[in-house]
Amino acid sequence: MTDIQGLFADDAGTARCAWCEATPLYRHYHDHEWGWPVADERRLFEKLCLEGFQAGLSWLTILNKREAFRRAFAEFDAEQVAAFDEADVQRLLGDAGIVRHAGKIRSTINNAQRALELRAEFGSLAAYVWRFEPAPAERPKHLTHEAVRAMPASPASQALSKDLRKRGWSFVGPTTMYAFMQAMGLVNDHLEGCHAREAALAARAAFKVPRADVSAAAARIGIQRQRS
């Protein structure tokens, strides 16, 4: 352990955020995924879905089942998941490797369909999501244990949640969306003193923020006009 609240140190003296102490898998996730900026479509869609499945559960529970979820949901290819039908719902309800919750399964299929709509409008899911990255002035000056505990949600996560719900998504509440933003690097909540914090900051500095594909949106509008 360290003397800094919210951190723990392993036998080698490496300090990490205390929430990942439980297992080697959790520590690997913390060190190599959580807080690193992501633009990959499948990873973003996967995380949106898995955060929905986490509701009422721990992230470690979902992380332990992540490979089973990937197999069950076509590696979170949104186009394939959007085409799932009632037979797929029943198949998934019989899959002991995942969380067998009918509402969350149906939500994932619905959200895949909504994700395709976002791609049509913005060119990519990434371009849509990264519009909600908070400005530096909206972030705590110091990332302490107390500061993070005081932020189960944020104005940015509330805005993302509200917009997704307006677009027909489900299981995307403000707290769920804040966890998504933490994991996908839209915010860096590695505590000060955590060995991963500076590496995640460097990754964000080198990251090219996805922008909306104006040509895709224009093409969509043109198609709509032709149909009307």
Image (spheres, grey):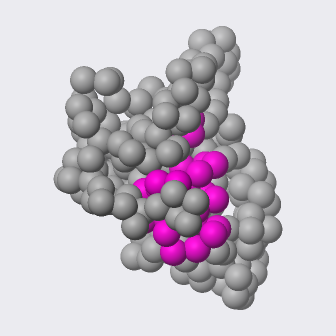
Residue 34, image x, y percentages: 54, 49
Left or right: 198 as drawn, with respect to 143? right
User: Which region is colored magenta?
Assistant: 14-37
Left or right: 161 as drawn, with respect to 205? left
**Quadrant assignment for the N terminus:** bottom left
Q: Judge whether 155 appears above or below 32 on screen.
A: above
Q: Is residue 23 magenta?
A: yes
Give the residue displayed 30% in from the left and 60% down from the top.
Answer: 3
Residue 109, image x, y percentages: 62, 61
Total labels: the figure holds 0
Give the residue displayed 63% in from the left and 49% down from the top.
Answer: 32
Residue 51, image x, y percentages: 50, 61
Give the residue displayed 74% in from the left and 68% down from the top.
Answer: 67
Left or right: 139 as drawn, with respect to 55? left
Give the residue displayed 64% in from the left and 74% down from the top.
Answer: 64
Q: Residue most toward the front?
A: 12
Residue 30, image x, y percentages: 55, 55
Q: Is residue 36 magenta?
A: yes
Residue 177 seen in this snapshot = no
Q: Judge whether 85 appears above or below 117 on screen.
A: below
**Quadrant assignment for the C terminus:** top right
